[in-house]
Image: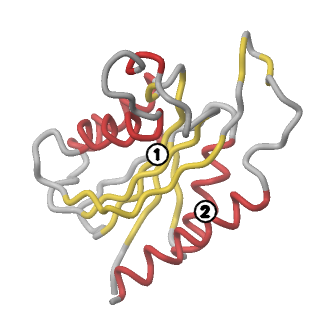
Amino acid sequence: MVKAIVLYNSRSGNTKRIATKIAEGLEVECRDKRNIPDLLDYDLVVVGSWVIMGRISFGGARYLKKLHRKNIAGKKIALFFTSGGPDEIHPMTENKISKTIKEIMFESMEKIVNKKQNVTILPERFYCTGAIRMFGKTKHNIENPTDEELEQAKAFGVQLKELLEA
């Protein structure tokens, strides 16, 4: 039997809600960045964070770096994140080769987690819209993540479970 865990960094609760749904689909436990267990007995580690100004949050980057001290070597890793505008072109790439926030986010998460090149990053990834906040206030009155995005997150967890059981 394959053993998996979902880990996340969340500020407003959006990423936590997505992580919880992914874990529900996988039928595994879900923990925040402050409660990361030793990962020695896990086959799959699903990691997620939120975006600030088109980049992984400072706390998210720090917890991903910490995974190297938690026996992550040899594990399969799946990535997810929440962002206010994941499909927008990142402003720092407009005059170069344009990349979306989604592309930059996954590249940076992969670079941090696979720094020692001793994990397998799965091509299956998930992202959804998170809260857009400015000066501590939510920009829109739209509930994020939406019910549809929560169902998609759960379906992503089911997809990962089926992939591992195959």
Depicted 52 relative to depicted 149: above or below? above
Q: What's the residue at 41%, 16% (across, down)?
A: 92
| Residue 46, horizontal then vertical, whole percent | 41, 58
| Residue 52, horizontal then vertical, whole percent | 54, 23
Q: What's the residue at 23%, 38% (across, down)?
A: 111
Depicted 166 relative to depicted 75: above or below? below
Please name which of the two marks, 2 or 1, marks the residue nearer to the observer. 2
| 164 relative to 74 in the view: left or right | right
Sequence-first disc among 2 and 1: 1
Q: What's the residue at 52%, 65% (across, down)?
A: 29
- Which residue is label 1 attached to? 35
Q: Which mark is residue 153?
A: 2
Q: Which mark is residue 114?
A: none
Q: What's the residue at 43%, 84% (across, down)?
A: 162
View extreme (right): residue? 141
What is the quadrant of residue 55 in the picture? top left
